[in-house]
Amino acid sequence: MTRKRRSYTDQFKFKIALEAAKGLKTINEIASEHNLHPNQVSTWKKKLLEEGVTVFGSHTARQQREQAATEAELYEQIGRLKMELEWLKKKATRFD
């Protein structure tokens, strides 16, 4: 029997990680209250402490990857156009 993976919102992850970072309750207590595995709570806490509030925002990471791919494509196109321009200049000098 397979179980479907649960997905959590960014706000929920941040709330749990912040609660764990405060240290008022143990990680095991937090995990049992929210029906999570303690390792998951520890992972979210570690990410929060290392990377800050934006760590759980997958939208920003995806936008950065898309922007990098677009930039690479544009630089590639610029390179091709430069090569074509140089070739045309070279060929045009023969006809002058």
Image: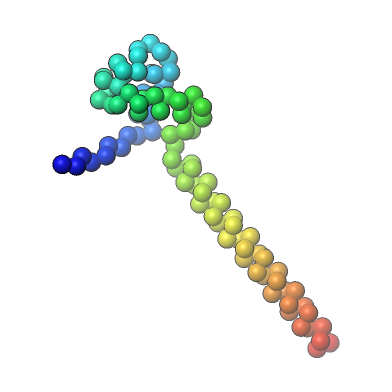
Left or right? Give the position of 40 relative to 66. left
Q: Quadrant of residue 21?
A: top left
Left or right? Give the position of 96 relative to 11. right
What residue occupies the far left of the structure in this picture?
1
Residue at 56% over, 51% down:
68
Left or right? Give the position of 25 relative to 81. left
Residue at 45% over, 25% down:
46
Residue at 23% over, 41% down:
4
Position of residue 46 relative to residue 76, above or below, is above
Residue 8 at x, y percent in the picture: 32, 34
Position of residue 6 relative to residue 72, above or below, is above
Position of residue 84 relative to residue 51, above or below, is below
Residue 80 at x, y percent in the picture: 65, 69
| Quadrant in which the C terminus appears | bottom right
What residue occupies the far bottom of the structure in this picture?
95
Q: Quadrant of residue 95?
A: bottom right
Render colour scheme:
rainbow
Residue at 66% over, 64% down:
78
Residue 51 at x, y percent in the picture: 51, 30
Residue 9 at x, y percent in the picture: 34, 34
In this rendering, the count of numbered labels is 0
Left or right? Give the position of 60 relative to 33. right
| Quadrant in which the N terminus appears | top left
What residue occupies the far top of the structure in this picture?
24
Q: Quadrant of residue 93?
A: bottom right
